[in-house]
Amino acid sequence: PADFPCSRIAPSPTGPLHLGNACTFLVNWALARNLGWRLVLRIEDLDQDRARAAGDTGTEESLRWLGIVHDGEVVRQSERLDSFARAMERLAAAGLIYESPHSRAEVREATAALGAPHADDAPARFPASLRPPPGPAWNFTRRDVNHRLRIDPGTITVHDRVAGEHAFDPGAREGDCIVWTKSGFPSYQLAVTVDDIAQGVTDVVRGDDLLPSAALQSIIHRALGAEPPRWWHLPLICEADGARMAKRHGALALSELRAQGVDAGRVRGLAAQWIGAIAAPRPLAPDAFRALVTEPILRTWHVGTRSAPPCLDERSLQWLHDS
Ligand code: GLU
């Protein structure tokens, strides 16, 4: 697979993309084009209730507007349930998963498992004492029961190309993780890993709120007989008040900015300023943005943002709307 490097953009259509997503996806696209990777687009639409509630989020139009061109057909996770079930059978054959029909709190956790764990939603630790005794529960015969993957304590070191080395112990920290929910869907952690393997993804570029998930996903990769990809976790952009940029901020949706006539070149210019590639924003054509994105720039950005994350302040917002 290393001979055919591939990355992916993997949005969840649970709300419109925002400027933080734009920055992450633009950097992902630039790395792919600079380093000769394929870049696939995967819509992570397993959480159908939230996707329906969000309506049409215009994700693909927003990516096109930003100048992000991906390779090949768009993959939708909602159409891949059989592949996820086959991965479950494989894990079951290896004796790694079990039915876990437990308390309300765990059902809550199972629901949360459908979405990626972003900042501030630390999962509760699941005690190994709640594993069932050896027997029929260690199987995947029912799709309407929560299933967990056995994760034993042990340190996993993530060697991140941007964020450096980080050690995690998912078995000690969170315990056995939900891989299948009683609503009949794989959890985010399982689905993302199965698809990264199926699509031959060698390089994962995404926000660093998912850095701890890289440890868990490395375990799932190996359990499915695959080598984990290289990781490139990027700093997140904050709101002016320091809060994480979230999909609820409707006015900052890319679809909204586009409708207001904002120039996509200005969004690229702002992203280039956020990553520290230019001191003051200026409108940038896609290729001009791309040329600014290098590994050293991204590492310096990471080190610099540990104390002060880049924020969307009033001035940047004003600048976006000047034309
Ligand atoms: N779909 C996930 C999200 O919206 C991202 C998954 C990933 O990049 O691993 O947060």
Image (spheres, grey):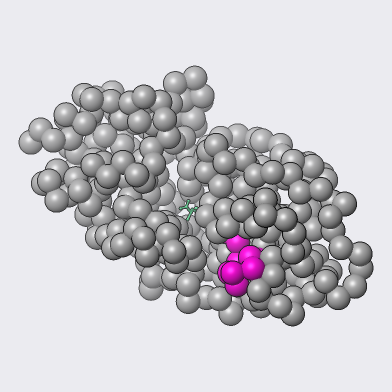
Q: Is residue 184 magenta?
A: yes
Q: Quadrant of residue 130?
A: bottom right
Expressed as whole percent of the image width and height from the top left, the position of residue 82 reads 58, 79
Residue for point 38% across, 37% down: 245
**Residue 233 can be seen in this image:** no
> Up-down: is 2 above or below 121?
below
> Up-down: is 138 above or below 311?
below
Magenta residues span 180-188
Q: Quadrant of residue 54?
A: bottom left
Please name the predominant secondary structure of the magenta segment in the image: loop
Toward the viewer: 72 or 173? 173
Q: Quadrant of residue 249?
A: top left
On-image quarter of the N terminus: bottom right
Residue for point 12% across, 46% down: 260
On-image quarter of the C terminus: top left
Q: Is residue 308 magenta?
A: no
Report how many numbered discs are placed on residues in the image. Answer: 0
Residue projecting furthest to the left: 323
In this image, 162 relative to 314: left or right?
right
Residue projecting furthest to the front: 104
In this image, 251 relative to 297: left or right?
left
Residue for point 38% across, 73% down: 73
Toward the viewer: 47 or 267? 47
Residue for point 74% across, 75% down: 140
Expressed as whole percent of the image width and height from the top left, the position of residue 32 reads 41, 53
**Residue 47 can be seen in this image:** yes
Expressed as whole percent of the image width and height from the top left, the position of residue 206 reads 48, 47
In this image, 311 relative to 37: left or right?
left
Residue projecting furthest to the top: 307
Expressed as whole percent of the image width and height from the top left, the position of residue 258 reads 17, 49
